[in-house]
Image (cartoon, rainbow, N blue to C red):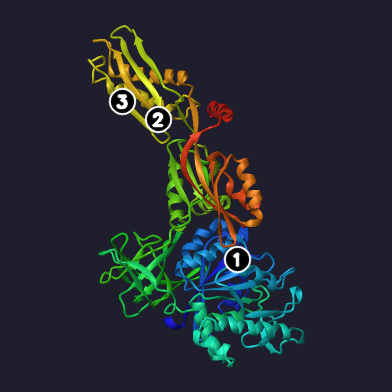
Amino acid sequence: MTEKTRNVAFVGQSGAGKTSLAEAMLFNTGVTTRLGSVDAGNSVLDFEPEELKRKSSISTGFHQFDWKKHTISFIDTPGDQNFISDTKLCMQAADSALLFIDAIDGVKFQSELTKEFADQYQLPVALFINKLDRERADVQRVFQEAGEIFEPKPILLQLPIGKESDFKGIVDLLQMKAWTYANGKATACDIPADMQETAQLEHDALVENIAEADDQLIEKYLEGETLTDDDLKKALQKGILNRTFMPVLCGSATANIGVDLLCNFIIDSMPSPVEASPKIAIEPGTGNEISVSPNANDPFSGMVFKTIADPFAGRLTVIKVITGKLGSDGTFLNINKDAKERFTQLLKITGKEQKPIDGAGPGDIVAVAKLKETTTGDTLCDPSRKIQYKVAEPLDGVITYAIVPKAQGDEEKIYSSLSKIMEEDLAIRLRRSEATRETLITGMGQVHIETTLEKLKRKYGVEASLNPQKVPYKGTFKKKVRVQGRHKKQTGGHGQFGDCWVEFEPMPRGGGFEFVDKIVGGAIPKTYIPAVEKGIIEATQRGVLAGFPCVDYRATLDFGSFHAVDSSEMAFKVAGSLAFKKAAEESGMTLLEPIMELEVVTPEDYMGDIMGDLNSRRGRVLGMDSKGKNQVVKALVPMSEVLTYAPDLRSMTGGRGGFTMKFVHYDEVPAQLCQKIIDEANKERENA
């Protein structure tokens, strides 16, 4: 039943224990026979070789288990910033989010980022402070830090019994009950005497916080009336659903402490698909936005939020069913592609396996294989009710490399194989740069791109290497000049003759190239004028300064001469090319470099380092702003200075900083750097 389903996204920083907790839940409920471990490499959820190598999730995992006549279906997302785009897309399928915080490290940038995703989707969020059995773990410090960073305010539901290696149990502050644990099994006990005063103070604060979520309840509370457990339970549910506050729980996934209480909390207090925020959709005919809530009696509709590409099994399409029902086989309409798709088997994803199921209804997360047209972001629906859900866009990549096949002739293999990988990883982008003649791969970080190359080799047998991306410098004229391009050559038969006078002048940045014909009186026949332009354009593309193309100038053809027998289109094309080269010498050309707009989000503590670093990269700060507890710096920085900014920023901020970057315009390279760039480019051309 939809009302007894809980779809929860496990989100937060890498290493906070999301997968370990999921493994503990599966073990406790008998889904698995052993407690899987990420570090030991026997996790049910992290099974790809690239995940085993790094001991960290790089792709979202799915599984489910039954708990007290409910089904908890979890979405175990990556926390590493290299793979966080997958997290963003898969969180769309959740009805709530459990945000993991490491009790030692505290709140990191990735946690703040996933909390922002949850806010975008209006998901209720609970915090789970994990690893309380580790040295230097501190619930109160992390809880206070979370209160300074996150909104709405966190409220503490539990306290740990014992600290670090002596951590052995949990106090439930709402019910004022306690449990100790041995081998994952809970035993009820009294609240320790040395904790009773603290627990009572925290209980009173919790009751007040919960009561604030309900107007009638806060009146009763302020008037001194006793609030019943039922009153508080309902108000807690309401406050979570309305995102009035974020409840905070604690425990240890690897020690299996507090995992059962967390499962109880999920079914008691987190929303079912029916209670969750409705999905926003568009009516294809009208373009109107509509709000859609789960209803089994409506025609089928669902959202494709992930694609899994396998070289043997083919494409696996993962769907969140929002309305209606699906049988074990059938057809539906892909509204984005306007194509009917047929499926012959309905699957439930359980870690690395897929199990056939008979049917699915609202709230279910299912998969179908080998759809021909469907990709991530598409809406599938019954043709009787056409509907298209609004879906999130993948995050923009932050680092780019040139990708080169190790074996000659593998260029096409790289393209075709990477295209399949890009079906499941939308954050990987591939493009051909006409300016530098390189094939460029863009991703969320160096590790992201390296992992993609590992998959490329393992899944498709294609090996490639990475080179630093070439900066697409361009040349331009510094001043107006008028020159003659004259080509005269006598051979045994007809000779070659073309003569043109061209004025070259700079144009504003972004002006491109403009050719103006001012020939009068037939000085050059009209049939030869396009040849002059073509000669200039070809010379422009080859460039004069180290082969960099030339931009932002106007060429005005105003005079010339021809020979009745020896002139030809080819002769005037050569004349145009000679005019360009001569003008380039006389004008004193300079280089232009691409300028990027950088937006850096960082905690206040790192602002000094960030500003100093931007200055050292020839950056020009446009402004600063606040974003929650973070600072946002906007700056214009030359592309050549930020090719490896992703790992540099991570190092500077301990992984707590993030950034976005986009091209804005070209600007002149400083004179002292210009010759150095030209010399390096010429040297590279000689060695090529």
Which residue is labeled 2 in the image?
507
Which residue is labeled 1 in the image?
149
Mark 3 vs mark 1, CA separation in Å: 60 Å
* Residue type marked 3: Val
Q: Is residue 172 visible?
A: no
Q: Quick check: 563 left or right of 186?
A: left
Q: Quick check: 138 left or right of 603?
A: right
Mark 2 vs mark 1, CA separation in Å: 49 Å
* Residue type marked 1: Ile
How packed mark 1 is, by other alpha carbons closer than 10 Å (few <14, some 14-19, many 20 or more), is some
Which residue is labeled 3 in the image?
516
* Residue type marked 2: Met
Residue 651 percent across, percent down from the top left? 65, 51
Of circles 3 and 2, which is in front? 2
Q: Is residue 526 visible?
A: yes
| Earlier-in-chain disc, 3 versus 2 | 2
Above/below status of 165 relative to 670: below
Above/below status of 340 relative to 405: below
- At horizontal 55% and vertical 84% (from top left) the residue drawn is 211
Residue 78 percent across, percent down from the top left? 55, 63
How packed mark 3 is, by other alpha carbons closer than 10 Å (few <14, some 14-19, many 20 or more), is few
Residue 202 image-quadrant placement: bottom right
